[in-house]
Image: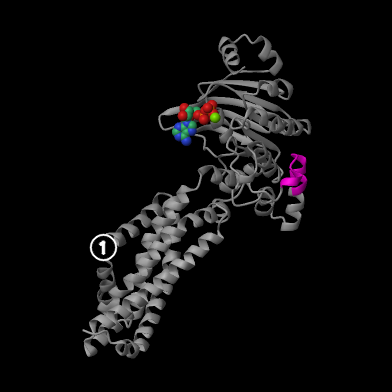
Amino acid sequence: MSMVEFKSVTKAFGSITVLKDVDLKVEAGEVVVLIGPSGSGKSTLLRCINALETIDGGDLVVDGISVKEGRSRVRMIRQEAGMVFQQFNLFPQMTALGNVSFGSRKVRGLGRREAEEQARELLAKVGLAERGHHYPSELSGGQQQRVAIARALAVKPKLMLFDEPTSALDPELRHEVLRVMQQLAEEGMTMIVVTHEMSFARKVGTRLIFMEGGKISVDGDPAQLLDHSENPRLRDFLQHVH
Amino acid sequence: MEFDWSVIADAMPTLLSGARVTILITLVGLAGGMILGVVAGTMRAYGGVILNAIALAYIELIRGTPMLVQVMFIYFALPMLANIRVDPLSAAITAIMINAGAYIAEIVRGALLSVNKGLREAGLALGLPTWKVLFYIIGPLAFRRMIPPLGNQFIISLKDTSLFIVIGVAELTRQGQDIMSTTFRAVEVWSAVAILYLVMTGVMTLVLRVTEKRMRIL
Ligand SMILES: Nc1ncnc2c1ncn2[C@@H]1O[C@H](COP(=O)(O)OP(=O)(O)O)[C@@H](O)[C@H]1O
Ligand SMILES: [Mg+2]
């Protein structure tokens, strides 16, 4: 069974169709890097997986559960699929420790002590052992994004979705987030990552997908595609992100 | 004419008992109004089409009619329509409740919608049901933003209780009127009444300021 399976998925906002008959299978352990021009549907594709957007046609199955099965099943999908947003979206009224322990307490039902202990381990893992008592507003963007990754991991997902996790960061802060993501990939986490970081795609990605106009137009090995793609629009796109 | 302090001294016990009734109506009415307002405001911000329409109908009905007419309706018309007896105090409390509730609903709705949508999505993405996202994440953030407009509404509601003179509730304005009609000392009586209202609204403002300060974090 695939971790994620899109079966002719269609998604429209009003009269514009944003995903057009998308078919895609992602297996456990894959690190899929999703690229494409702005507006090509990358975020929408990601957000359909954890049902932040509802699909209009076809079917989408995540770890055996269809996004169309109903609310409580959708919540199970969301617990399986952690998400990291471009704008971090940390809860501003909670400390880093509060943010990370929140999911295990309110979703997994752990007690405070246990949840905080686990949160401390996760913060250490993302290199922020000393920052647990800081509020998001007291952290740099790179630190906030690492807290956000730890927050998503606290629910113990099987799959991680990243939507341009470094795009809101200054260039010198990006590597610290990318390093955490690389470590996660090395531990075997299944990941789908929308990013413009081509070095990450080459080094960490096991698969590169190029989207255009709501469709997957190229799907293959990252190094192969980055160096010798036949597709002129992909080559053109890569020239502009470099 | 001379300002006669003894009039005030004599009137004070009666005025204070009136102030107590004013406070009772305000506190109980606002407590109910907060519950109504939070429910209706949440329905407006997050309810589906039907819940939203119900809340909107309630809000527009109340905002579109004078409070004086509302309390007259509750006190005089409701008993005829539904065959239930309403005592003046209950009518007054109910009027504050449904009236403040409608305005508070709009405050709640605005505050809920002003919280960054990304936080709601982050909560949902963890696998939480919507009500938990509202209760643990959006609600606390929205609450802090509600305090200044809520303070405004609380003060308006407190002053609105003086309208209940028309149904004979023994609140502060009514007591002032009673004393006036026996002593004819308008300057002293209405000065004392005004100062008592000022003290009550002043305390309310102070409590809200302190609450806002204590909720510094965002
Ligand atoms: N909530 C929405 N309402 C209406 N249109 C939307 C919404 N979200 C995205 N879109 C539109 O869908 C298209 C794809 O958007 P998106 O998936 O965000 O693209 P990408 O992430 O590749 O830039 C764009 O044209 C965008 O304007
Ligand atoms: Mg996007």
Residue B115, image x, y percentages: 50, 48
Q: Is mark 1 within 8 Å of ligand 1?
A: no
* Image height of B14 relative to B129, above or below: below
User: Quarter-wise, where is residue A43 in the image?
Assistant: top right
* Image height of A210 relative to A65, above or below: above
Range drawn in magenta: A120-131
User: Quarter-wise, where is residue A151 in the image?
Assistant: top right
* Image height of B64 relative to B86, above or below: above
* Quadrant in which the N terminus of chain B is drawn: bottom left
Q: Nearer the viewer, residue B120 or B50?
A: B120
Residue B195, image x, y percentages: 35, 76
- Indicate yes or no whether the magenta region holds residue A121: yes
- Dot 1 falls on which chain? B
* Circle 1 SS class: loop
Q: Residue placed at 52% from the left, 63% from the top?
A: B211
Give neighbour class at mark 1: few <14, some 14-19, many 20+ (Cα, 10 Å): few
Q: Nearer the viewer, residue B218 or A204?
A: B218
Colouring convention used in this rendered image of the protein: one colour
Q: Report whether B167 appears left or right of A112.
A: left
Q: Which residue is mark 1?
A: B65
Ligand 2, by image quadrant, is: top right
- Indicate yes or no whether the magenta region holds residue B118: no
Asked if residue B79 shows in the view, the reply is no
Residue B212, image x, y percentages: 51, 60
Residue A172, image x, y percentages: 67, 28
Asked if residue A19 shows in the view, the reply is yes
Q: Nearer the viewer, residue A189 or A142?
A: A142
User: Quarter-wise, where is residue B160 in the image?
Assistant: bottom left
Q: Amino acid at mark 1?
A: Thr
Q: Residue placed at 67% from the left, 9% from the top?
A: A228
Q: Report whether B82 appears left or right of A88.
A: left
Magenta stretch, main secondary structure, is helix
